Image (cartoon, rainbow, N blue to C red):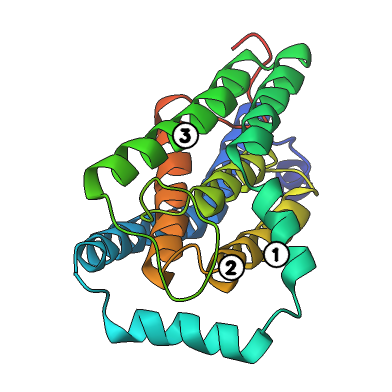
Amino acid sequence: MRAATIREMPIPSWHMAETARAGAQIQREPVRTALSWLVAVSFVILAVTTVLAFVRPPVPAEVSTLTWIRGTFGGSLDGLMRFLDEAGSVAVMSPAFVALAAALLLAGRRRPAVAAFAGGAAALLVNIVIKTLVSRPRPDLWAVEVDSIGSYPSGHTLFVTVFFGLLVVLLRGTRWRGIALGAGVVVCLVMAFSRLYLGEHFPSDVVASLALGVLIVSAVERFIGLSASQHPAQ
């Protein structure tokens, strides 16, 4: 009788809450570790690609990569690549960031709205500043119309990386996060490839942009916060 009574004693609610929090913390640890490694690798990539951006003339491997892409695909993907050229431009991506921030603001999520706007503004500012400071000449391998501003980094690749990175963090804890992550990886890689296909950037330009995008999203999340679980009043 006494043993049965002990077994049937209800578990205090505070104990259940503590157990749930401990379990969630354990589940988050691998994710945090992976993100820390991703940020660290991004810093290394950025350092290496910055060195390559100052090499004059460009290292043969970068030129060979562009030549191989041109020779392999020719003009077979011109339509898609030109579409991506327009889709990833400042004229399209800037309103996209503003629309995302406005949608979050209308939903009562003020802090994530500020973070989304800050992420877009940071991507634009970082792109302009680094291009100006590094002033890397664009590839000049075949006849192609390119911007006069520097080649390093790729603004198109940076914008889509930051945009989808923000979406992934915003959707954390929801069933849509995996979809956003998968779509983001595909779009970012295809956008990066389009810059090489069109001959507008060197490989190190687009790789640097992917790393910069990760660092910008990480900084926004750290200093402003993008969690979808935040209270609307925040």
The residue to which callout 1 is attached is 81
Give the amino acid at mark 1.
Answer: Met
> How far is disc 2 from disc 3 in space, using C-alphas?
21 Å
Q: Nearer the viewer, residue 168 or 12?
A: 168
Please identify, in this view, whether the residue under mark 1 or under mark 3 is nearer the observer. 1
Coordinates of residue 80 in the picture (x, y in percent):
77, 65
- 176 or 146, which lies in front? 146
Whether the residues at callouts 2 and 3 have beta carbons within 8 Å, the answer is no
Tell me the amino acid under the disc marked 2: Leu
Residue at 40% in and 62% down: 205
Residue drawn at x 61%, y 59% as measured from the top left: 188
Residue at the image point whose x is 66% and y is 17% from the top? 231
Q: Is residue 165 left or right of residue 187?
A: left
User: CB of mark 2 within 8 Å of CB of mark 1?
Assistant: yes
* Disc 2 element: loop
Could you tell whether 102 is left or right of 154 in the image?
right
Number of the front mark, 2 or 3: 2
The three-letter code of the residue at mark 3 reads Leu
SS for callout 3: helix
- Which quadrant of the figure has residue 52? bottom left
Quadrant where the C terminus lies?
Answer: top right
The vertical placement of 229 against 189, above or below, is above
Q: Residues within 10 Å of mark 3 (few under 14, many from 20)?
A: some
Residue 91, how many percent across, how many down? Answer: 64, 34
Q: Residue 198 bears which disc, if any?
A: 2
Q: Is residue 35 visible?
A: no
Q: Earlier in the sequence, mark 1 or mark 3?
A: 1
Marks 1/3: CA distance?
A: 22 Å
- Determine the residue positioned at 58% across, 68% down: 198
Disc number for residue 124: 3
How far apart are the two marked residues, 2 and 1, measured between alpha carbons? 7 Å
